Image (cartoon, helix red, strand yellow):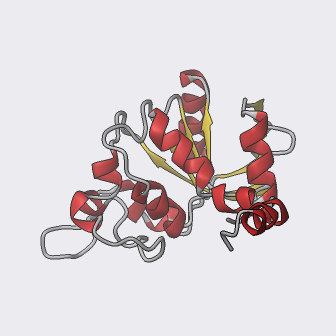
Amino acid sequence: MQAFTTHTGLVAVLDRADVDTDQIIPKQFLKRIERAGYETLLFYDWRYLEDGSENPEFELNRPEVRGASILVTRRNFGCGSSREHAVWALENYGFRVVIAPSFADIFFNNCFKNGVLPIPCAEEQVAELFRRFDEHPGYQLTVDLENRTVADAFGLKFTFRVDDFRRHCLLNGLDDIALTLQHEDKIAAYEAAYGIA
């Protein structure tokens, strides 16, 4: 997993609440088990028209947000069924940060396990980010995980909360497997002692 310390990136906004995981990555794409190749499938039903061309009305298809790596959206993002593929699709697309007033629990946990930083913040803060996005073409944010801050180039700066353990894992690029492998010598010793190896 890629470590996360400080990230500055272009912002895209998704002005929708209760975006569920089937909207993030539709169920027909869940047969694959690898973590790569989902970037074209993200928000598939919204991004594409029936003929396969891009829907010009969809927020992420706007030319000015191509290459965005920070998504700002509304409450209860990632609700619905449990599917890690939803985070894989966001990460494959290039999103490192998702900012919303609230997240569904399983989606929130899956973000941390896959190197995406979910930042819950007040509705008023999200509304201000939407306002600044509209006011400043090419709007960017800097997210500093070490200091737990979100800032822009126009005077905005606020802090966010993040669990210390999750913060440690992201700062060091540790997913569940990497955390386990930190104890590889103890695991090997145990296996040798019980003839497992």
Position of residue 136 relative to residue 64, above or below, is: above
Can residue 70 be seen here? The reply is: yes
Residue 124 is situated, as x and y percent measured from the top left of the image, at 58, 22
Residue 2 is situated, as x and y percent measured from the top left of the image, at 71, 66
Can residue 153 be seen here? The reply is: no
For the residue pair 179 and 65, the one nearer the viewer reads as: 179
Q: Quadrant of residue 60?
A: bottom left
For the residue pair 4 and 61, the one nearer the viewer reads as: 4
Q: Residue at x 81, y 57 (%)?
A: 172
**Callout count:** 0
Q: Is residue 148 left or right of residue 76?
A: right
State the residue lying farthest toward the left: 50
Q: Residue at x 82, y 64 (%)?
A: 189
Quarter placement of the N terminus: bottom right
Q: Residue at x 38, y 64 (%)?
A: 61
Q: Is residue 114 left or right of residue 165?
A: left
Q: Residue at x 38, y 55 (%)?
A: 59
Q: Is residue 103 left or right of residue 70?
A: left
Q: Quadrant of residue 185?
A: bottom right
Position of residue 111 relative to residue 102, above or below, is: below
Residue 40 is situated, as x and y percent measured from the top left of the image, at 37, 73
Quarter placement of the C terminus: bottom right
